[in-house]
Amino acid sequence: MSVTPPVAPPGAAPTAPAPLPSPRGESHARSFRGIGVGFLVKLVIMAVVNAFGILTILTAVGADSWLLASITAVLLIVADVVYFTRRALPLKYLLPGLIFLFAFQVFIFGYTAYIAFTNYGTGHAGSQAQAVDATLIQGERRVDDSATYAMSVVERLGTYGLAIADDDVVRVGTPDEPLTTVDGEIGASGAPTEVSGWTVVPRAEVLTDPSVQQAAAALRVPLSDDPNDGALRTRDGSTATVYTSTLVWDEQAQTITDTTTGTVYTATDRGTFTSADGESLPTGWYVNVGFENFLRVFTDGALLQPLLSVTGWTFAFAILSVVVSFGLGLLFALIFNDPRVRARKFLRTLFILPYAFPAFMSALLFRGMFNSEFGVINDVFFFGLPINWLGDPVLAKLAVLWVNVWLSYPYWFLVCTGALQALPSDTLEAAQLDGAGRWRSFRSIVLPLLLVSTAPLAISSFAFSFNNFTVIYMFNNGGPAIPGAPYALGSTDILISAIYDISGVSGGAADYGLASALSIVVFVVVGAISALAFRQTRKLEEFA
Amino acid sequence: MRMTAPRRTLLGSAAMLAVSALALTGCSGGGAGDDTAAGGDGPEIVVWTDAEREQAIGDAAKAFEEETGATVRLVQKNFEDLRNDFIAQVPTGEGPDITVGAHDWLGALVAAGVVDTIDLGDTASNFEPVALEAMTYDGQLYALPYSLETVALVQNTALVGAEAPATWDDMIQRGLASGAERPFVINTAGETGDGYTMYGLQTSFGAPVFVQDASGSYTSEVGMGGAPGEAFAQWLSTNGQAGYLSTTIDYDINNELFASGKAPYTVQGPWAISSFDGIDVAVNPIPSAGGQTAAPFVGVQGFYLSAQSKNALLATEFLVNYLGTEDAQRALYEADPRIPAYTSLGQEVASDPIIAGFLASAQNGVPMPSIPEMGSVWDLWNAAEAQIISGAEPVSTWNQMITDLQSTLAG
């Protein structure tokens, strides 16, 4: 595989001097000669691509998502340049793959890395502006004994105000002018229908015109010059009630003041509003915390201790899963490759069955079967002894390994069967003539040759087992819990399920920053091991 | 060959490019389409719902759409995904205007700053006070409640009659006398533990999960420690040894044992009643194990309003004046029968003895804490209960759990 091809790779071929010169060296996809189908097809496809791209850009601009708009614009220009110029021809084979790589791998990894440097999680979910909005919402309360007034939204020279029917009189005001009594008429619905000096906006328009609606929802009309009297606001466009706000936001000073107690909450660099005596408002925002999450992984004793044991078990789980299932698969492959076994095809099909089941279903079924009181395993194989498979840390580990081996050995059976059939029979015959026994030819010829083709698969299988969330989560969710561990880590938790616990998605108190930092650590570990292992497998190829 | 092969590649790659452009559009498109709505007839409000309630909300939306000219777009999601998606998407501007949700999400939603307050005005008196209380956080109402749910003692009338047992011991005696295989069965979620189902029994020892202040609001002070908590732990251990509580029993096994008559009593919620087809059940309040009234958690479901809604007036209008009406509440009840939070509807459906039984249990109950700290409690609490039932030393395990919990909450 790694041999350099003697000729240029296929992607580069068109730029090399054409071996069979077509007229003027034009690619068929560019040629207008003949029917020109190739070019037309390309034109149509590129038109569609451009249409989608422009649509995306317009939508992104409409949503104020400038980053997405500019990325799409760049990609679109690159695509057009690549497909319509001669110079960038080799790229046309690479570009789609590169875009996919960027969109689905680089971007996601980059985003995870970005989150790892923030405190994104419970209480730190949005921007500071949103936290201020939410805090002001939380501080604005309806006055307990406030009457509910029928009201209309009124407009004068682009300024919106509220007109209420207070008994028989119409009163009107804007955020800048407190309520004053004016002439007007009250309609059948009880709301003012005519207000002198103002245009009444029909309620249907208030509700259906987004800009009017947002203006009306934001209206706070003070009752009097004294702000402590409160202000009228409407929640549904037809009635108004009096609200008072207890929190005041000072953008210059970056403080929120509670007017009832006089407490000043200052914006901190931790993404919270905190008062002098250390009390925080509930809603915060996410901020960059630098390497803190990474440091916490390695320095927080309460976290590090269980994480180390989880890491140890993750390696054991991944290595044992691969080794045991590989061994088992190879053993069965050897047995069922022997011509003396009858009905080999049928038996082989049976062996592949577990491979064809959805893994999560199997894991769920096994959870039931391992139940110490009601499960089949104790009933049938252990004479009904109450062996607590799922409750004992060691037995639970054995059980989870068993499930994973059961799920994965058919894969190795399949792979090894294929590899065995591809072995050169002359080499084996030669060994036999030289007097090598069964074991000797297996050890010196079959196994090394087999490993050449299967070792890369074993490495990817290791990486897969290392992150095999499904089996752990579905089988017993990492249980039984390690007593005293934070985030309720369990003794069969592997790193990926531990990260899931820490992310708090299931419980509610989430810490995405820490979870992202951990997943990056895991990525580095798996990546390094895979790279090392792939280097080692090159040595195997010397046998080939 | 030389002609077709590269063309296929070109076709393929262009198609891929189109797909990736489409994917990118998908990333941004959803929210942008919602906000602008310039192309449509009128504004659109987006409501997230789960499958059970989709139809009923859609019915309530029809009248609203006719009268206001606005459109209500229902987006169906898994109920379990709603909270996290709501927290993640509202700040990006891609969230809905309204979502269905449970009241115990409230603390997390407030901390994330994604929910707006609502004002029910005079219509507030139509709802059960406990439901409004559950949807209230720091004195502010954040959601329109529509259903209550709680667990209660479900008994097999053929084995033990419909009469409610007075205490835990009384119930065990009757269960043993019934001749069934086991006197009582309760779900512990297997080895995971299930503090939720067990909570009524725990409160009968006077060990609430968090201390409530004078006004009934939960503080972040853990209330499960001390002598009452230790007594409960001891009780868990004793009954675990006796086999009345067991970590081999998960939700399905629990319902199977009860439905097949192998246990005459269980503690379950209304959602499990459909698993008990074919046997006559009676529903009663949970008996006291520790002497005080058993107060199970009451959960409330309702509709939350997004803090970033671009159509706040319209969404409030739909929420309060359409979903908050008796007709809409009845449609929701019929679509997915839960105890109604709408008082008059509750009285109407309480003619069903099973609903009445759960209602009686709910009246003994307490709202599940909605403070964000509650999210940190479950895992440690469940695990400690499971360990004690399986035979761990009760008092030290329980106190260790309290210590861990306090340090988690402090950190």
Image: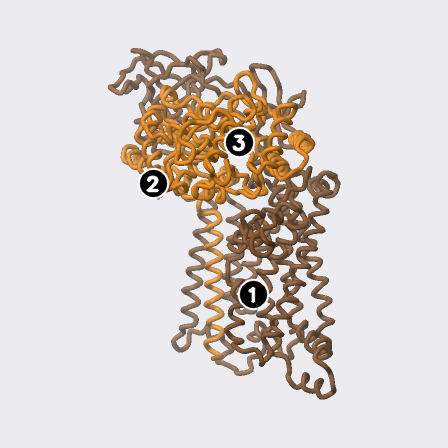
Q: Position of residue B252 (x, y in %)?
A: 48, 44
Q: Colour of chain A?
A: brown
**Residue depth check, mark 2 versus mark 1: number of the one nearer the observer:** 2
Q: Which residue is pictured at 63% across the width and 63% down the height?
A: A325
The nearer-to-camera label among 3 and 1 is: 3
Q: Are marks 3 and 1 in contact (CB under 8 Å)?
A: no
SS label for mark 3? loop
Query: Badge 1, how many Cα within 10 Å: few under 14, some, many 20+?
Result: few
- Is A284 placed above or below B126 here? below
Report helix, strand or loop for mark 2: helix
Identify the disc placed on residue A144.
none
Chain B appears in which tint?
A: orange
Residue denoted by label 3:
B113
Disc 3 residue crowd, few under 14, some 14–19, many 20+, Cα 10 Å: many
Q: Position of residue A189 (x, y in %)?
A: 27, 20
Which is more toward the observer, A19 or B403? B403
In the picture of the structure, the residue carrying the numbered disc 1 is: A94
Using the image, tell me which numbered label, if any, was put on residue B55: 2
